[in-house]
Amino acid sequence: MRRLPIFQVDAFAERPFEGNPAAVVPLQSWPGDALMQAIAAENNLSETAFFAPEGEGFRLRWFTPEVEVDLCGHATLASAHVLFAHLGFAGEAARFLTHSGELIVRREGADGLYAMDVPARRGPEIAPPEGLAAALGARPRLCLKTGPMLAVLDSPEELLALSPDFPALRRLCQGLGGIGLTVTAPCRGPEGWDFVSRHFSPARGIDEDPVTGAAHTVLVPYWSARLGKTRLVARQASRRGGTLWCTDAGARVILRGRCADFLKGEIVLPD
């Protein structure tokens, strides 16, 4: 029997059962893609991350239960946490080589805060696609064409009340190339959040993602320009919820958050 270590980590979380759970599988060499996809399907989490040493850093890949994806923020944060907290990694920064370029995660201070440096993504304003308002259950003020499509609402109350028609939303997103949809609104409440969001990716097998680092590579540049500030506090308003402390650094975005351990174990595979 072959055995692979596996960790399950709640990313962008102060304690277990918050944030976004990710499975992390450290490797010394790469198995076949079909096996990694099967492991991700078995885990049935929004993302399973696999990494292995390469050069002066690590090659990192992410799989949903259905497909491999080009960028996943929360599973990158979870992978760095596994390196720092469990595998004795002593470097100043964990450097990951990915389909989206180099991603860097550093420890900030002694209270478990990680800072993840990722590419910013911007896009032009577009008309809301036909059928979006009906599938979403609200009419966006505007949409942006980015990695995931960004839809902007007027209030957090409108965002929290969303109850999408997921079969319809899945068909819409599939027809647009399998994209995800990030919905956002400004927030001026006592919590100190600058904006709130929710992320839907039914075309990739995830109706609603709890906390989505990749979506914030779009959200942070948008809200930084709209609010006229480079340091922002973001809240993803899923059922689990998560908070991110963000910086717009021009071509890059810095996303800060903590991680909480949930489990550590082994995957047992036949020879």
Image (spheres, rainbow, N blue to C red):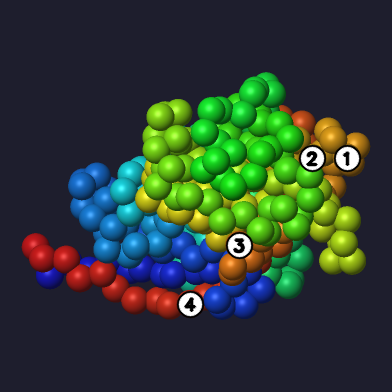
Q: CA distance from mark 4 to mark 2?
A: 32 Å
Residue shown at the point (83%, 33%) measured from the top left: 225
Task: Estimate the spatial distance between the alpha carbons at disc 3 and disc 1, rounded to whole Å.
Answer: 23 Å
Where's residue 17, x and y in %? 55, 76
Q: Are marks 2 and 1 in contact (CB under 8 Å)?
A: yes
Which element type, helix, strand or loop, lies under badge 2? helix
Please name the amino acid that badge 2 sits on. Trp
Is 120 or 226 nearer to us in this picture?
Answer: 226
What's under tag 3, amino acid-wise? Answer: Ser
Of marks 4 and 3, which one's residue comes earlier in the chain? Answer: 3
Q: Nearer the viewer, residue 137 or 108?
A: 137
Q: Which mark is residue 227?
A: 1
- Kind of residue at badge 1: Leu
Answer few, some or many: residues within 10 Å of disc 3's Cα (few below 14, many 20 plus, some between 14 and 19): some
* Tag 4 residue: 262
Looking at the image, is mark 2 or mark 3 earlier in the sequence? 2
In this view, the residue farthest toward the left is 271
Residue sitting at 48 percent across and 77 percent down? 262
Q: Position of residue 43 (x, y in %)?
A: 33, 64
Of the image marks 4 and 2, the number of the one nearer the N terminus: 2
Residue 223 marker: 2
Q: Are marks 2 and 3 in contact (CB under 8 Å)?
A: no
SS class, disc 3:
loop
Instruction: Give the distance between the C-alpha atoms of the residues marked 2 and 3, in whole angstroms.
Output: 19 Å
Residue drawn 40% across the image and 76% down it: 264
Tell me the residue at 82%/38% (across/down): 224
Residue 238: mark in rendering: 3
Locate residue 3, reporting x and y percent. Answer: 22, 69
Q: Secondary structure at mark 4?
A: strand
**Does residue 54 appear anywhere in the picture?**
no
Instruction: Pinpoint residue 128: horizontal percent, then vertical percent.
Output: 61, 29
Look at the picture and state if 187 lies above or below 109: above
